[in-house]
Image (cartoon, helix red, strand yellow):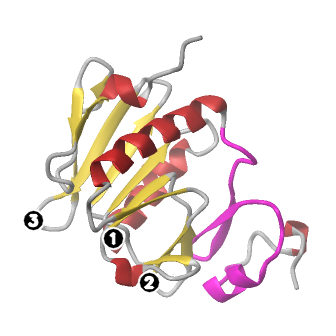
Amino acid sequence: MITDISQLDLNKTYTYKDYLSWNFPERIELLMGKIFKMSPAPSVVHQRISGNLFHLFSTFLWNSPCDLFSAPFDVILKKGTKSTVVQPDICVVCDISKLDKQGCNGAPELVIEILSPGNSNREMKEKFELYEKNGVQEYWLVDPGHESVTVYSYDDKKKYIGSKPFVKSEIVQSKFLEGFKVEVALVFRTRTK
């Protein structure tokens, strides 16, 4: 049994079965079979934004058949021959047949990723491409540095079309979740003493 990440060859390609057999504290993702280490713990800003988003979506989805999950939560993407296991910051799953005790087997309908200094390229390129290819119908990219939200939704050819970045003075809305819209300022809201 693998109990320390140092026992793994980070240049090797691994499977989902391998991933399930590991028992170490580090959080990782498998992108096309390759190991990517995740930050040990998200920053306070990241956690605050995640909490705000979770609250806003949870309130909207309260009487919905869709489920809402936050990281750490495994999403296993099946397309291609190489294993991919990601842990989106937040995801919405409306097809509950995809859920098992491990997480979501297949694409959630909506995924939200919050950028941080160590993951911006991965979220903006690699995960963007994975989510688009695997059927995530809507992808929200939240940028704390610019306090903006960009929404990518499928067009009729199942390719992402991106919105302009919505900033704090604007309202962002979902194309997938009909009727869901929120002031961007609430996404970046901080608590005052």
Instruction: Pick the residue in front: 66 or 18.
Output: 66
| Residue type beneath disc 3 | Asp
Above or below, comparing residue 1 to residue 124 in the picture: below
Q: Residue at x 46, y 53 (%)?
A: 90
Q: Residue 76, which numbered label?
A: none
Sequence-first tag of 3 and 1: 1
Quarter of the image that includes the C terminus: top right
Spatial distance from mark 3 to mark 1, Cα to Cα? 14 Å
Position of 112 with respect to 173 (left or right) is: right
Q: Which residue is mark 2?
A: 80
| Rendered view: 169 above or below 36 | above
In the picture provided, is 12 more to the left or to the right than 59?
Answer: right
User: Would you say the residues marked 2 and 1 are in contact, meaning their CB atoms lie under 8 Å apart?
Assistant: yes
Q: Position of residue 112 (x, y in %)?
A: 41, 50
Q: Residue at x 44, y 26 (%)?
A: 188
Q: Which residue is mark 3?
A: 156
Magenta region: 13-42
